[in-house]
């Protein structure tokens, strides 16, 4: 990859250009970090005025599962770096573009493996030998019944491809009806037309971690670093609710968690940041769950906790710039804000006066143009003298925020 030392003016000759495939709230922070380094930013998504488009130089609205559309935009823009920001992207297009010489961050292979639960399990268990929940694959209702019996109850059925917990179905009883119902539910929420699912042992979680591991150019070699683990809790839901740093877990557990993340990042390769999800079960097992080859939603907390946020790290690593391992400079916490409103355009994010009046609290309003039930619209971030204090402030401020039509 290119070793870079100079920046030029965006929109002029030889500007350094990043193209974001996916322009959500994480892409928006990536775009802001890129802008700060004088980089030209192109934001692409399937809908107009997605969050990162508000802070980009140009934007495109395309179907990102359409290989031709992805290739056409990238060949027109000829960016120095392509940063996939979501899972739902044509990986065939990414592989083809990579073979033409485009830099896809971290690389097309990582994006392909990590978006597919079956491929990812094979990689984690067969290639890396990492501990995971017990699992089986199934591709029809009969297989699913057999797979659930093998894994045991309760178990969790997930589609081969989905994100944010879509299509997760817990099966508590061995009755054939409940397995088939769960299988059909998972398949109906799958991205694409796959009928394959993973059946996982449902574990009793004590805590979840997101470990940010990254690979960047250090001199002429690629070095791997792992940030202090982020801890997170989902209250039994399948999506991000709260996260905090620094971690409060036992050092022995943190060492195992960190080691898993390092091995995953090195196994996938390339340059850039990986959000590695790890479970700690109540019976003391540390298990690899999955990985996002990009900044992670629970990592929004690093905007207030680390010397370099996960976004700054990802941008630097993508550009061939060094990103020395960041220290945690303040305890901090994040609380995500969701809406239940359906199809409201330009929703009002209210209560900012009171929430921002809490010392140490900050809010990121994503600026999404419309709502659907369960859509994330903002995040509250807080610093404190301790994680407890930061979490208390973030929770209190989040309660003051309301989303209205
Ligand atoms: N086998 C399991 N046992 C218990 N809980 C689980 C299991 N698998 C997943 N979960 C819970 O569901 C959450 C989402 O699971 P997973 O990360 O596999 O789905 P996802 O669709 O990729 O979600 P996200 O995009 O938020 O990471 C986990 O963070 C965890 O809280
Ligand atoms: Mg996950």
Image (spheres, rainbow, N blue to C red):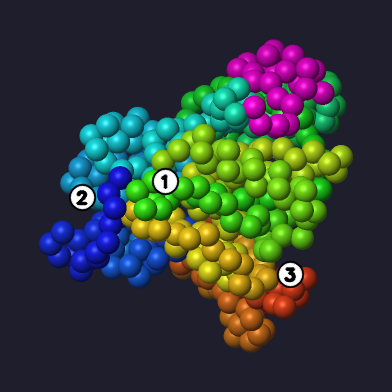
Q: Position of residue 351 (x, y in %)?
A: 62, 80
- Sooner in the amino-acid sequence: mark 1 or mark 3: 1
Q: How far separated are the C-alphas under marks 3 and 2?
A: 44 Å
Q: Which residue appears farthest toward the left when viewing the image?
A: 13
- Name the mark nearer the viewer: 1 or 3: 1
Res 246 visible: yes
Residue occupying the point 73% across, 69% down:
387
Ligand 1 within 8 Å of disc 3? The answer is: no
Q: Which residue is mark 3?
A: 387
Q: How far separated are the C-alphas under marks 1 and 3?
A: 33 Å
User: Mark 2, residues whose alpha carbon is within 10 Å: few (<14), some, or many (≥20)?
Assistant: some
Magenta residue check for 134: yes
Q: Is residue 235 above or below residue 285?
A: below
The residue segment tinted magenta is: 129-152
SS category of the residue bearing label 2: helix
> Which corner quadrant of the image does residue 120 belong to?
top right
Q: Which residue is mark 2?
A: 77
Residue occupying the point 28% across, 68% down:
38
Q: Which mark is residue 222?
A: 1
Q: Horizontally, is 81 left or right of 184 in the view?
A: left
Say how many tags the image has: 3
Q: Position of residue 310 (x, y in %)?
A: 51, 59
Magenta residue check for 357: no
Residue occupying the point 35% across, 70% down:
36
Q: Horizontally, is 171 left or right of 198 in the view?
A: right
Q: Is residue 280 above or below residue 140?
A: below
Residue occupying the point 64% across, 18% down:
138
- Sooner in the amino-acid sequence: mark 3 or mark 2: 2
Q: Horizontally, is 221 left or right of 99 in the view?
A: right
């Amino acid at each position: 990859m290119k070793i870079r030392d100079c920046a030029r003016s965006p929109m002029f000759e030889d500007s350094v250009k990043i193209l974001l495939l996916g322009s959500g709230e994480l892409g928006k922070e990536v775009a802001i970090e890129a802008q700060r380094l004088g980089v030209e930013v192109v934001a692409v998504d399937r809908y107009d005025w997605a969050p990162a488009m508000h802070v980009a130089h140009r934007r495109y609205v395309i179907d990102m599962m359409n290989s031709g559309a992805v290739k056409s935009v990238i060949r027109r823009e000829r960016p120095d770096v392509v940063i996939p920001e979501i899972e739902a992207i044509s990986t065939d297009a990414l592989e083809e573009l990579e073979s033409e010489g485009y830099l896809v961050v971290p690389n097309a292979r990582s994006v392909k493996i990590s978006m597919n639960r079956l491929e990812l399990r094979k990689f984690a268990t067969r290639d890396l030998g990492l501990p995971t929940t017990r699992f089986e694959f199934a591709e029809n209702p009969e297989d699913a019944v057999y797979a659930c019996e093998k894994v045991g109850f309760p178990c969790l059925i997930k589609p081969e491809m989905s994100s944010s917990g879509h299509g997760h179905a817990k099966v508590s009883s061995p009755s054939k009806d409940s397995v088939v119902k769960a299988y059909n539910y998972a398949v109906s929420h799958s991205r694409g037309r796959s009928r394959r699912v993973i059946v996982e042992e449902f574990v009793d979680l004590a805590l979840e971690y997101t470990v940010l591991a990254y690979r960047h150019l250090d001199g002429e070699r690629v070095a791997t670093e792992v940030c202090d683990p982020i801890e997170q809790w989902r209250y039994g839901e399948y999506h991000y609710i709260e996260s905090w740093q620094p971690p409060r877990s036992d050092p022995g557990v943190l060492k195992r968690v960190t080691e898993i993340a390092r091995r995953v990042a090195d196994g996938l390769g390339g340059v850039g940041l990986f959000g590695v999800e790890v479970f700690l079960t109540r019976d003391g097992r540390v298990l690899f769950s999955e990985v996002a080859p990009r900044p992670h939603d629970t990592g929004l907390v690093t905007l207030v906790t680390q010397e370099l946020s996960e976004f700054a790290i990802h941008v630097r690593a993508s550009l061939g710039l060094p990103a020395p391992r960041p220290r945690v400079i303040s305890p901090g916490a994040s609380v995500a804000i969701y809406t239940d409103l359906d199809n409201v355009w330009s929703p009002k994010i209210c209560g900012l006066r009171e929430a921002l009046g809490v010392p140490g609290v900050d809010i990121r309003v994503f600026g999404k143009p419309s709502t659907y039930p369960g859509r994330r619209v903002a995040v509250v971030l807080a610093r404190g003298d301790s994680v407890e204090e930061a979490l208390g402030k973030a929770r209190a401020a989040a309660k003051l925020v309301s989303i209205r039509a």
